Amino acid sequence: MTSIRQSKKVALTRVLFVSQRRAESMQGRPTAAIISITDPGQVRAELKSGWGATLRVAFHDSDPITFPFANQDLTPMKEVQGLQIAQFIEAIPQTVRSLVVHCRSGISRSAAIAKAIAEAHGLAFDPSYFEFNRHVYAITKAHLRPVA
């Protein structure tokens, strides 16, 4: 007899992206998870306790897809970080319904990750929003498994 291991279904109903300042002011809830993005070498965001799950990653807001020769001294998102994000999403407790993604300004990196996750989960994301980091979006999307 063979058994098929089924992955648990992630029950997200909402994904939003915010600035670091806004994320630091939010009270964590067991029904919400957070992905915290900071620049390498900078102080981590001071998140309040109570989040259902937390992932911290560090990379610069560098987009070698759109600007291949700009900011070559910065550290762009790496494939392994896209994999970390995908594994985090797969592992969050089923009681988590909301996901908050933050970066310093809440415009580019966090939006890219929020967009990729929203699309993979069939959730709303403003189709007119184009400020997201294309590099971060592509890496994140490549590692996410669409939810049926």
Image (cartoon, rainbow, N blue to C red):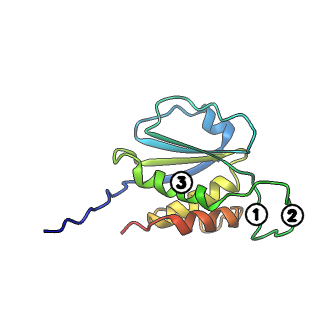
Local packing at callout 1 (Cα closer than 10 Å; few below 14, some 14-19, many 20+) is many
Quadrant containing the C terminus is bottom left
Question: What's the amino acid at mark 1?
Answer: Asp
Image position, residue 83 (x, y; %):
54, 59
Local packing at callout 2 (Cα closer than 10 Å; few below 14, some 14-19, many 20+) is few
- The residue singled out by tag 3 in the image is 84
Quarter-wise, where is residue 24 in the image?
top right
Question: What's the amino acid at mark 2?
Answer: Ala
- The residue singled out by tag 2 in the image is 70
- Label 2 – label 1 distance at C-alpha: 8 Å
Image position, residue 13 (x, y; %):
42, 54
Of the image marks 2 and 1, the number of the one nearer the N terminus: 1
Q: Nearer the viewer, residue 41 or 26?
A: 41
Looking at the rendered structure, the secondary structure element under dot 3 is: helix
Would you place residue 38 above or below residue 121 in this image?
A: above
Looking at the rendered structure, the secondary structure element under dot 2 is: loop
Would you place residue 114 above or below residue 105 in this image?
A: below
Q: Nearer the viewer, mark 1 or mark 3?
A: 3
- The residue singled out by tag 1 in the image is 63
Of the image marks 1 and 3, the number of the one nearer the N terminus: 1
Contact check, label 2 and label 1, Cβ < 8 Å: yes
Image position, residue 9 (x, y; %):
33, 58
Q: Is residue 84 left or right of residue 43?
A: left
- Label 3 – label 2 distance at C-alpha: 26 Å
Of the image marks 3 and 2, the number of the one nearer the N terminus: 2
Tell me which residue sits at (47%, 55%) in the image. 87
